[in-house]
Image (cartoon, helix red, strand yellow):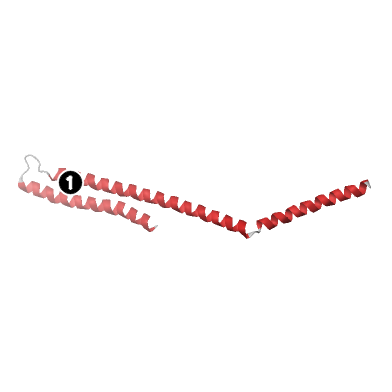
Amino acid sequence: MNKLAKKVIVYSLLVGIVQCGLSTAILEASPNDRQQQDKQQQDRQQQDRARQDKQDQEQRDRKDQDRQERIRQENDRHEQEMRRHDGENDRDYQDRMDREHERHNHAIDDIEVILGLGILYELTR
């Protein structure tokens, strides 16, 4: 009887282990669980995209502010330079104004190209 009891106990434990394995496999294959996992993954992806979009927008705003600040500084410098110097005759003043206008236009174009293209690149990315 002792051997029979041991065999019954061992076989019942094996049957219990098999039942646990089957029930686990059934739960893993259930469509509700898979749909829930897919929804959670989609939610995470949407949150990641929203976070990335927010960071991109902040970066574009910073670059735009930097561009505007540089243009303001260049305009201030240009305005200061356009004032007539003491003891400067008309011809020298006119020559200096022409050079300054050209230099100012190149500086503004450079600012727009360097910082403006960076913003355009970020927008198209």
Q: Quadrant of residue 122?
A: bottom left
Q: Nearer the viewer, residue 54 or 73?
A: 54
**Residue on which the image places disc 1:** 78
Residue 55 place in picture, x, y as percent? 40, 49
Specify whether 97 is left or right of 25: left
Q: Nearer the viewer, residue 32 or 70?
A: 32
Going 28% across and 54% down the picture, which residue do you hit? 113
Above or below, 47 relative to 31 = above
Residue 60 place in picture, x, y as percent? 35, 50
Pick out the residue farthest to the right: 1
Q: Secondary structure at mark 1?
A: helix
Pick out the residue farthest to the front: 32
Q: Quadrant of residue 36?
A: bottom right
Q: Nearer the viewer, residue 55 or 72?
A: 55
Specify whether 89 is left or right of 109: left
Going 22% across and 52% down the picture, which residue do you hit? 106
Pick out the residue farthest to the bottom: 31
Q: Quadrant of the C terminus?
A: bottom left
Residue 73 place in picture, x, y as percent? 23, 44
Number of numbered markers: 1
- Crowding around mark 1 (Cα neighbors within 10 Å: few <14, some 14 to 19, many 20+) is some
Residue 10 place in picture, x, y as percent? 84, 49
Going 23% across and 50% down the picture, which residue do you hit? 107
Q: Nearer the viewer, residue 20 or 77?
A: 20
Going 11% across and 49% down the picture, which residue do you hit? 95
Q: What kind of residue is marked 1?
A: His
